[in-house]
């Protein structure tokens, strides 16, 4: 039994390491002209993507204004989006709010949501932030992937979760997919980044491996 447990631990460690080392896709594509920046933002367990609050990008997320977010605020600099498990995401704004029920769902299976938040200037360099240089086509592809994850309501617009949010500058929306600890938020982030032409590790369940793989496998990424 002890041998079996040890073998399981070794296999898990090997999968984690190889998941970061082996890039996806395996071979880099031709470099494209980079004209803009997005940010990969991470904490200990979760990653978000921050898009610049430029007029063309805010227009793509115009539904946020319809749901009460002030997209015309002069201090708005970044639009931050992430994907995660419904119960854990909605009910755990801080670690102090952690409850057994949402944690259990995160470890098993839960419906998914998209979180969108408005952010001000981010002083760079910053810990846990990777700066990504992108071209116009790649930026469009990343936003397309984010928007394709949203579930529409009966009126055909993103299905906002009424009354959900951490404050006045964020909203939650129903999203496609199912969440668990092995197929979680960081794999969704990886998929969006790959749509933008970036290489990620093959399997990055934790932010530390995703940040390392993105910084290692992409010339257009910097961790200031």
Image (tube, grey):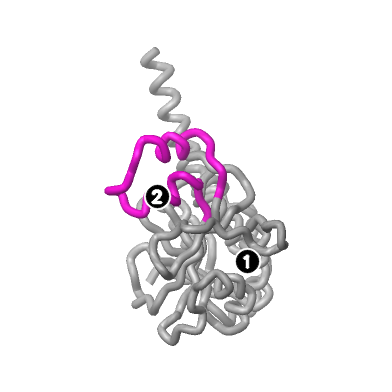
Residue at 55% x, 75% y: name it.
65
Q: For residue 134, what is the image quadrant? A: bottom right
Pick whichever, 196 or 223, lies toward us.
196
218 relative position to 211: left or right: right
Which quadrant: the C terminus? bottom left
Nearer the observer, 143 or 58? 58
Which portion, as a residue range, is magenta? Answer: 83-112
Rounded to the nearest whole Å, what is the CA distance between mark 1 and mark 2? 22 Å
135 in relation to 177, above or below: below
Is residue 168 shown in magenta? no
Q: Dot 1: what SS?
A: helix
Residue 210 x/y as whole percent: 47, 54
Local packing at callout 1 (Cα closer than 10 Å; few below 14, some 14-19, many 20+) is many
**Residue sitting at x 51%, y 79%:** 71
Q: Position of residue 169 (x, y in %)?
A: 43, 70
**Name of the residue lying farthest toward the left:** 96
Instruction: Say whether disc 1 or disc 2 marks the residue closer to the N-terminus.
Output: 2
Residue 31 visible somewhere in the drawing: no
Residue identifier under label 2: 45
Residue where numbered disc 1 is placed: 142
Q: Residue 38: where, in percent of width, then height?
A: 51, 72
Instruction: Find the residue positioned furthest to the top.
Output: 1
Q: Is residue 97 magenta?
A: yes
In x, y percent, where is residue 158?
64, 62
In the rendered image, which quarter contains the N terminus? Answer: top left
Residue 127 visible in rendering: yes
Residue 13, quarter of picture: top left
């Amino acid at each position: 039994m002890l041998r079996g447990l040890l073998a399981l631990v070794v296999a898990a460690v090997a999968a984690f390491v190889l998941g970061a080392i082996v890039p996806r896709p395996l071979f880099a594509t031709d470099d494209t002209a980079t004209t803009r920046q997005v940010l990969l933002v991470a904490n200990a367990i979760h990653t978000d993507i921050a898009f610049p609050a430029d007029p063309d990008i805010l227009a793509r997320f115009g539904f946020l204004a319809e749901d009460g977010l002030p997209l015309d605020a002069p201090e708005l600099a970044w639009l931050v989006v992430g994907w995660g498990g419904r119960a854990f995401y909605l009910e755990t704004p801080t670690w102090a709010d952690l409850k057994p029920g949402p944690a259990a769902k995160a470890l098993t299976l839960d419906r998914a949501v998209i979180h969108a938040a408005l952010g001000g200037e981010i002083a760079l360099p910053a810990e846990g932030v990777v700066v990504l240089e992108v071209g116009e086509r790649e930026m469009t592809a990343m936003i397309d992937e984010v928007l394709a994850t949203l579930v529409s309501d009966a009126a055909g617009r993103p299905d906002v979760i009424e009354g959900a949010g951490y404050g006045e500058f964020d909203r939650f929306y129903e999203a496609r997919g199912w969440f668990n600890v092995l197929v979680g938020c960081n794999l969704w982030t990886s998929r969006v980044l790959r749509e933008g032409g970036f290489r990620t590790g093959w399997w990055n369940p934790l932010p530390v491996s995703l940040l390392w793989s993105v910084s290692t496998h992409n010339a257009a990424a910097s961790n200031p």
